[in-house]
Image (spheres, rainbow, N blue to C red):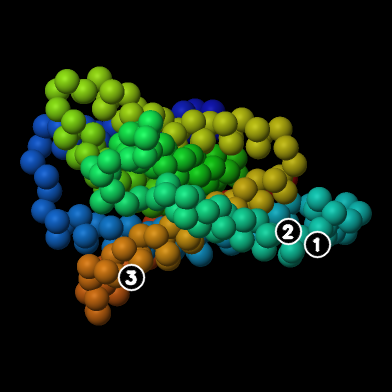
Amino acid sequence: MSGWTTAFSIALTAFFGAMAAGLAPRYLPAGKPGLWSATTAVAAGLLLASAMVIVIPEGFEVLFLAHPPQTIPHADSFLGLPKVLASGLAILTGFLLMLGMESGGMGHEFSQANNTGTEGQNPIHMLALGLGLHALTDGLALGASVATGLLAITLPILAAIMVHKVPIAFGLGTFLWQNGKSEEHESLRLLVWFSLATPLGLLITFLFLRHLPHEWIGLILLFSGGTFFYVAAVDVLGRVRRQQQGMRLFRRVGLGAILVIAALILFQLLGFEAEFHS
């Protein structure tokens, strides 16, 4: 498939997956709490492994190997910084961005959604906005991975994002449809905004990265790795640990990590893996 065909296919998958999960509470009874708890723990493992095994290593590879130092002068630096420093700053920036958003009340928590907001603010609107901004950062990772042209990189990232995104979309939909039929139009509008955020981030990132030096793809991947690491290790895993403890939690998070590694091995056996070329 061409780059744009792949990008649009993945964007549609992300959109319809989020919409379906968000609409499910409107027509179905709420799922068992234990099932969603287990799913969230597996999602933490998927995200953590995606960050540490796929996104960050691939970002380093693209950044450092796009132009070997012996072929282009000063290829060991980028934006006036040593590439090692630039890569570390990209990861740190992604991590701090997610921390800042969480600190500003734009996290994944739903417990405050029904409380009265400050004057002029609807808490449901603020929740949808915060989740949508989170989803935009997912789109950055997907767009950068599509720009590498490697399905073996893109598909595990897509799987990790969707497994993480589906429970969040379901939780958002649960609160949206509590407003009653009189506000269904507004609830649907907010759900569409949330569902569009990741596809838009993907397409915009892919559009601009196609015209930038390959080092930018590496930096965006590293930045996305920082956001993935925060969401997995601090946000998702932190919440899961308040509900689950011991070996059960370890097994579920480990299962998510094993699924990512197994997918990489499978893609390599199927011939989807290839070296990055500048």
Toward the right, the furthest residue is 73
Q: Amino acid at mark 3?
A: Gly
Toward the left, the furthest residue is 29
Q: Residue at x 51, y 64 (%)?
A: 52
Near-viewer residue (144 or 195): 195
Q: Residue at x 23, y 71 (%)?
A: 244
69 sits to left or right of 114: right
Mark 2 packing: few (<14 Cα in 10 Å), some, or many (20+)? some
Question: What mark, if any, has residue 254 been given in the picture?
Answer: 3
Q: Amino acid at mark 2?
A: Ala
SS for dot 1: strand
Question: What mark, if any, has residue 82 been given in the picture?
Answer: 1
213 sits to left or right of 104: right
What is the distance, in whole Å, between disc 2 and disc 3 at their CAs?
31 Å
User: Could you tell which of marks 2 and 3 lies nearer the N-terminus?
Assistant: 2
Q: Quadrant of residue 129?
A: top left
Q: Residue at x 12, y 48 (%)?
A: 31
Question: What mark, if any, has residue 26 been given in the picture?
Answer: none
Q: Amino acid at mark 1?
A: Pro
Question: Label 1 near label 3: C-beta < 8 Å?
Answer: no
User: Could you tell which of marks 3 and 1 lies nearer the N-terminus?
Assistant: 1
Question: Label 1 near label 2: C-beta < 8 Å?
Answer: yes
Which label lies toward us, 2 or 3?
2
Inspect this view and state whether residue 249 appears: yes
Question: Label 3 near label 2: C-beta < 8 Å?
Answer: no
* Residue at the disc numbered 2: 86
Name the image quarter holding the C terminus. top right
